[in-house]
Image: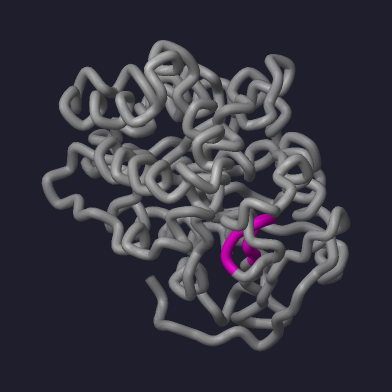
Amino acid sequence: MYSPIEPYDQGMLDVGDGNGIYWEVSGNPAGKPAVIVHGGPGAPFSKHGRRFHDPEAYRIVMFHQRGCGRSTPDAGLLETDLSVNTTEHLIADMELLRTHLGIERWQPLGASWGSALSLAYAQRYPERVSELILYSVTAGRRTEIEWITRDVGRIFPRQWERFRDAVPEQDRDGDLAAAYARLLNDPLTCERAARDWCAWEDTHVSLDPKHRPSPLFDDPAFRMTFARLVTHYWANDCFLSEKDDLVENAHLLRGIPGAMIHGRYDVSSPLDTAWELSKNWPGGDLVVIDEGHGGADMVAAAVEAANRFR
């Protein structure tokens, strides 16, 4: 990654529904626009998000999606209305931010959930996207959600049983994300549910022997915000209908060059989504790295792609 830099501009953008999103811009004010689209939902990029792009060549935009990071209100607060936090809202927020910053076209770089949101935005506004860089590729499909919350338990049976048994018995054979979302909306059960959810997140993310638990989950406030947003989205199929299938609709990206970087050992997000996407997206090149979910070599490959597109 490039050396650390500080933003030269930042602010809060009123996006409606009582929400404000934090944004910042770094790099070259006259450079090629790029936007960092973070994962989660609810896991905002830190200052390291500024380091994917050459700061002399790019105008680097970062923002925190609704409800997380420095955006307001905090989704970790039970009184925060999550009904106005959907994929449709996030797409609209990105487009409002682009207009606010006076950008004609930009290059989304998205990781994990951020790759799905980048795909959704690019398929809605292809004329506003110069290139796409995606790593730890996901598409928000029901099959992916079922895999993460249930099927991957075949690989981690002890940890998965603990994850499943943390919800009421009558909910254990149903939608586990929805069951956790209900627990996370109850002041009597939300703290324990956030710990249990994040413990499972740390388990299923990788088979890479170099993987280490995320220190972010040590923070109770981060755990709550992250868990409430992830379960809210997953319980609602990421607010994507069958007609919004991001893999099936990848033909809408025709004419947009792109790079997809995915880990062979990523059991959280199996490689088949990125593989199918590469077959449906003319111009979308797939690079497979022998790592788990978001490893260092994958980050280096994303930096290399940004260098290629500058």
Of all residues, the one furthest to the left in this rendering is 209
For the question of whether residue 230 can be seen, the reply is yes
* Main SS category, magenta section: loop
Q: Quadrant of residue 165?
A: top left
Residue pictured at 16% horizontal, 27% vertical: 158
Tell me residue 142's x, y (percent): 54, 19
Residue pictured at 69% horizontal, 70% vertical: 22
Q: Is residue 266 above or below residue 92?
A: above
In the rendered image, which quarter contains the C terminus?
bottom right
Observer-nearest of 142 and 253: 142
Of all residues, the one furthest to the front in this rendering is 188
Tell me residue 281's x, y (percent): 59, 28
Observer-nearest of 136 and 288: 136
Tell me residue 35's x, y (percent): 64, 61
Residue pictured at 48% horizontal, 45% vertical: 188
Observer-nearest of 35 and 293: 293
In screen coordinates, is 85 left or right of 197?
right
User: In the rendered structure, which segment of residues is drawn in magenta?
Assistant: 63-69
Whether residue 67 is in magenta: the answer is yes
In screen coordinates, is 235 left or right of 168?
right
Q: Is residue 208 above or below residue 109?
A: above
For the question of whether residue 134 can be seen, the reply is no
Whether residue 132 is in magenta: the answer is no
Tell me residue 177's x, y (percent): 49, 28
